[in-house]
Image: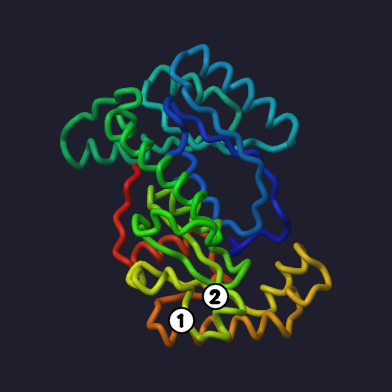
Amino acid sequence: MPDRPAALVERTVFYVSDGTGITAETMGHSVLTQFEGLRYRKERLPFVDTLDKAREAVARINEAGRRDGSRPIVFSTLADPQVNAQLKQADALILDLLESFVVPLEQELGMKSSHSIGRSHTIADAESYKHRIEAINFALAHDDGQSAKGLAAADVILIGVSRSGKTPTSLYLAMQYGIKAANYPLIPEDFERGALPAVLPPLKHKIFGLSIAPERLAEVRHERRPNSRYASLENCRYEVAAAEQLMRREGIRWLSSTTKSIEEIAATVVQQLGLERRTV
């Protein structure tokens, strides 16, 4: 079997759950990223907790298969055996995530699981949701250095030149980890002074830097401001070199976002700063 398909493959991927579907989507996405030639449309079907809802899900899955001309891929976390059995009537590749993990654990531990619907979405899930919303609001309020108010409450402050990936990483940390992330752009005035923005030095222990290859930065900036000095390769080279020099001088940990996914960047930030995940 070749390492990757010769041609691009397109499928519809469904995430089906008796809860929010976040677990199914997170696990499914992690698996699908291993297939570089796969293009897919995703649909989340949450709260499928009755036979009628399962039948509706089957109808949608089968319709997608007829439309695409190929079987959909379904990641499922349904706990109710009857609802799960109904879903498996769909003409699709169904990957039962609970069955994949629960059954082997039952055999290993010599005990039966509860198979309770939504068991993972109880008090712990409510607390997780609270942390996620608070973190998202914090990230939005402290995006691009727009406010220093309450900055001391940040778990991490991302710095880097404009368009180096700070905003998407901040939001990903908020949504997936419940981590309060602020971000500050490094601008030419900072490089001329040779110092961090004035509000940041007291919080240096919370700072993590992002850099990016100048060529990639120029491509990204050209999409926003074509043919501007802001997007010129010469300026991008200057800003990236100056930012990296500043971060080295200040002893700030940093990485290049050029070839890394948002998931990889976020995981590195969490590991490097010893942050604690607040979501489940």
Disc 1/disc 2 C-alpha distance (Å): 10 Å
Indicate the secondary structure of the residue bearing disc 2.
strand
The residue lying furthest to the right in this view is 227
Q: Which mark is residue 211?
A: 2
Query: At 46% across and 45% down in the image, what residue appears?
Result: 136
- Report if residue 272 is visible in the image: no
Query: At 67% across and 50% down in the image, what residue appears?
Result: 39
Indicate the secondary structure of the residue bearing disc 1.
helix
Q: Which of marks 1 and 2 is in front?
A: 1
Instruction: Give coordinates of residue 14: x percent, y percent.
Output: 57, 35
In which quadrant is the C terminus drawn? Answer: top left
Q: Which amino acid does label 2 sit on?
A: Ser
Label 1: which residue? 247
**In this picture, residue 106 sits left or right of residue 251:** left
Asked if the residue at tag 2 contacts the one at tag 1, i.e. Cβ–Cβ closer than 8 Å, the answer is yes
Instruction: Give coordinates of residue 115: x percent, y percent.
Output: 29, 25
The residue lying furthest to the left in this view is 110
Judge by depth and name the residue closer to the eye, 2 or 136: 136
Q: Which amino acid does label 1 sit on?
A: Met
